[in-house]
Amino acid sequence: MDNIVQKEYNKPKIIETNIEIEGRRFRMNEITGKADGFKDEKYIIIPTESFSDYAEHPLVRTIYPTDVGFFPRARAHYREREDGAQQYILIYCTEGKGCIEVEDRTYHIGRSDAFCIPKGRRHKYYADPEDPWSILWAHFKGEVTHCYPLEECRVVHMNSRQSDNRMMVLFKLLFRVLERNYTLGNFIYISQVLSLILSEIYFREKTDESTVQDRHVTMVIRFMYENLKRSLTLEEISEEVKLSRSYLNTIFKTQTGRSPVEFFIHLKMQEACKLLKATDMYIYEVSSELGYEDQYYFSRIFKKVVGVSPRDYKNGDYFYCE
């Protein structure tokens, strides 16, 4: 598309009318013929069919929005599509609550939660009747959608004020650009902004989440240090710290590169190294001190982890610091 001629069009005409819901009057914005009628809503349909040459540009076709909007306090908001949608649907809740049903599963959405409905999947979504949600949303498609975990159907919580602020800013950028003229440059820009929104949700490290994981790992390691004389199993560790075995395995491999049990064994061998170098304890005494009834089994584990036998370590110029 090197020979694309940049075209410029005026932004779509917005018609303001009023409707009455439950005895209250609201302003209804009709943009390209569609509206939901929520007070102060924003709803923009991007006429990608009219700009097919733009949509084929290599910086646009990777991923681009087809509709974007904001529905504040959207009481009685309801959508149902038996055959799904032709685009992915991203919903970000800024306040209130709602539900999203994808095929036979229901997902509860609250403040600072994001969720993507995969294209072509039967779904419906609706606001909580008592505490209706406010949602920022976007329909989108593109060649690289498979690079994001959009088919997982999972709720992603933006658990820091900074992440929440970034989401608000990025959506404001989308609206600001879309309310201007349709040009190739603006199409490229909104494509990049959408990529940032999805990356913020799925790829940016969640600082608070990492902090929670760090705290859990630290708690477990302290428990291990306090119980070096025991032969702990993953089940015993899990029960003691009240965390699931699968979660413990995940966070330990992420943070340390080892499973909890492997990490515990390395702590034991580190302590064995200290005792062998700093005391006059015999190898069988070190073995017993660390909960190994069989001295020869202890020696095999020690050599596997440290690289030399306990005797060679005690008598040689070795230093194990891992």
Image (cartoon, rainbow, N blue to C red):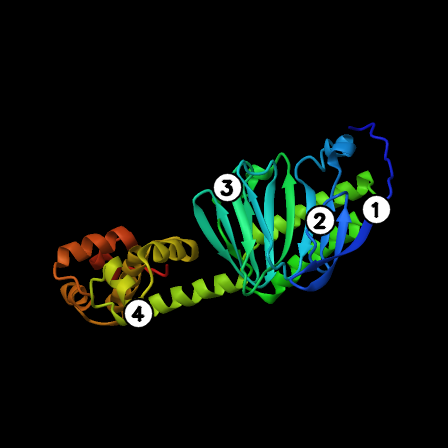
The part of the image, by quadrant, that contains residue 168 is bottom right
Along the viewing direction, whichever of 156 and 291 lies nearer the viewer: 156
Residue 207 x/y as whole percent = 54, 62
Can residue 231 be seen here? The reply is yes
Residue 173 x/y as whole percent = 74, 54
Task: Measure the C-alpha gap from mark 1 to mark 2.
Answer: 13 Å
Please give the name of the residue rendered at 73% of the width and 31% of the height, measured from the top-left corner.
56
Between disc 3 and disc 4, whose residue precedes?
Answer: 3
Nearest to the eye among marks 3 and 4: give it: 3
Residue type (three-letter) at the residue carrying disc 3: Glu
Task: Measure the C-alpha gap from mark 2 to mark 3.
Answer: 28 Å
User: Which residue is disc 4 drawn over?
Assistant: 223
Task: Measure the C-alpha gap from mark 3 to mark 1.
Answer: 35 Å
User: Which residue is disc 1 drawn over?
Assistant: 13
Nearest to the eye among marks 1 and 4: give it: 1
Residue type (three-letter) at the residue carrying disc 2: Ala
User: Which residue is disc 2 drawn over?
Assistant: 35
Between disc 3 and disc 1, whose residue precedes?
Answer: 1
Dot 4 alpha-carbon crowd within 10 angstroms: few under 14, some 14 to 19, many 20 or more: some
Tag 1 secondary structure: loop
Please give the name of the residue rendered at 28% of the width and 53% of the height, measured from the top-left corner.
305
